[in-house]
Image: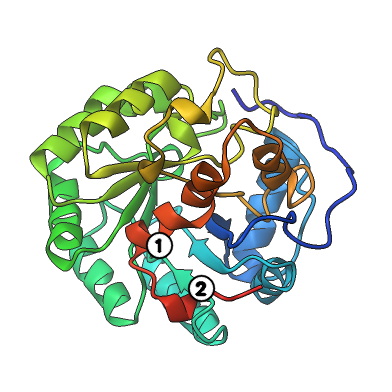
């Protein structure tokens, strides 16, 4: 549960990714136009934690790439109807400045008219896939209006990042994530759309064990580590990534909307019980497959 005044850490940050990491793909980075970013940061300041890095989209990419991140996956979400096309054009413009070092995900507001057409236009702009956030957009993943979105992504082989884990939730959301999000509901989606490739972020927090079992069962489901291995949120489960199907797990940071140093999660991974092959899988190999990245897009350190 997100509550006002969650901890903020002014920890020392590294000047580069940890030694021994061949490549790092950050699969969970947020970008927005300035005024929307300001509104998001204001919401976090009042209802969750203080954002450590209040910087522009261009500076976000520079910050990570200059410190040795090999590739960035940039995410956004439309918090209301009528703005998805603007966001998609913004994303396409910003990633075009980065010469292949950044991939951008489209967004749609699922229940708005012509959401399917908006998504197709986003893909025509060169965007890699789609990001949806049930807590913010309050969609029912089993509703009929979701089916065209799933079908387009299936047909076009575009990955979907869909935040449908129940946590971290907030009483300030307009809907209760516990009513519209569950591992069981997501399982119905991926069974009904076997060609749809879905990543549920944050290891599916708070149904971490359920999602660990689901990625073992289904070849069209992935997850990412974002924020939940940093010992920031109280967790009812102990997470041991060595017990996961690691070709379905990828690293993500949630940068810049974090209350601690940019490389906190990388340090945790570097100090874990994972061997180099396992680390490589989480740090970049899984993301290469999920996002269909080429060798040219993976910058050498």
> Is residue 114 depicted above or below 138 in this figure?
below
How many labels sit on residues? Answer: 2
Query: Secondary structure beneath disc 2?
Result: loop
Q: Is residue 107 something that shows in the picture? A: no
Residue 121 at what x, y percent from top left? 26, 77
> Is residue 141 depicted above or below 149 in this figure?
above
Residue 153 at what x, y percent from top left? 20, 60
- Count neighbours of disc 1 (C-alpha within 10 A) and say few if under 14, some if 14 to 19, many if 20 or more: some
| Quadrant into which the C terminus falls | bottom right
In the depicted view, which residue is nearer to us: 12 or 260?
A: 12
In the depicted view, which residue is nearer to us: 1 or 283?
A: 283
Where residue 124 is drawn, which disc sits there? none
Image side of residue 179 versus residue 189, left or right = right
Q: Are marks 1 and 2 in contact (CB under 8 Å)?
A: yes
- Count neighbours of disc 2 (C-alpha within 10 A) and say few if under 14, some if 14 to 19, many if 20 or more: many
Image side of residue 217 versus residue 75, left or right = left
Residue 6 at what x, y percent from top left? 76, 29
Q: How is the image coloured?
A: rainbow
Where residue 288 is drawn, which disc sits there? 1
* Residue name at image x 54 percent, y 80 percent: 94
* Residue name at image x 79 percent, y 48 percent: 261
Alpha-carbon span between mark 1 and mark 2? 9 Å
| Quadrant into which the N terminus falls | top right
Tell me which label, 1 or 2, sits earlier in the chain.
1
Query: Secondary structure beneath disc 1?
Result: helix
* Residue name at image x 59 percent, y 68 percent: 70
In the depicted view, which residue is nearer to us: 164 or 40?
A: 164
Q: Which residue is mark 2?
A: 298
Image side of residue 101 versus residue 138, left or right = right
């Amino acid at each position: 549960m997100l509550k006002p005044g969650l901890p903020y850490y002014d920890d020392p940050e590294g000047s580069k990714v940890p030694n021994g990491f061949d490549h790092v793909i950050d699969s969970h980075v947020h970008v927005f136009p300035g005024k929307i970013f300001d509104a998001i940061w204001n919401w976090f300041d009042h209802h969750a934690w203080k954002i450590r890095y209040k910087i522009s989209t261009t500076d976000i990419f520079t910050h990570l790439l200059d410190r040795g991140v090999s590739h960035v996956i940039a995410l956004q979400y439309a918090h209301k109807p009528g703005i998805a096309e603007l966001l998609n054009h913004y994303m396409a413009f910003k990633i075009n400045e980065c010469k292949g070092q950044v991939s951008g995900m489209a967004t749609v507001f699922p229940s708005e008219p012509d959401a399917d057409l908006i998504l197709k236009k986003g893909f025509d702009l060169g965007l890699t896939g789609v990001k949806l956030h049930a807590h913010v957009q309050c969609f029912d993943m089993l509703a009929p209006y979701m089916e065209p979105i799933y079908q387009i992504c299936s047909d076009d082989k575009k990955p979907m990042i869909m935040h449908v884990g129940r946590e971290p939730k907030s009483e300030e959301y307009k809907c209760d994530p516990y009513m519209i999000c569950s591992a069981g509901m997501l399982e119905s989606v991926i069974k009904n759309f076997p060609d749809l490739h879905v990543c549920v972020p944050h290891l599916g927090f708070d149904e971490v064990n359920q999602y660990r079992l689901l990625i073992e069962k289904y070849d069209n489901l992935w997850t990412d580590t974002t924020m939940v291995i940093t010992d920031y949120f109280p967790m009812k489960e102990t997470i041991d990534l060595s017990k996961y199907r690691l070709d379905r797990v990828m690293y993500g940071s949630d940068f810049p909307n974090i209350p601690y140093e940019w490389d906190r999660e990388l340090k945790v991974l570097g100090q874990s019980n994972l061997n180099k092959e396992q680390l490589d899988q989480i740090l970049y190999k899984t993301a290469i497959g999920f996002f269909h990245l080429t060798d040219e897009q993976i910058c050498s350190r």
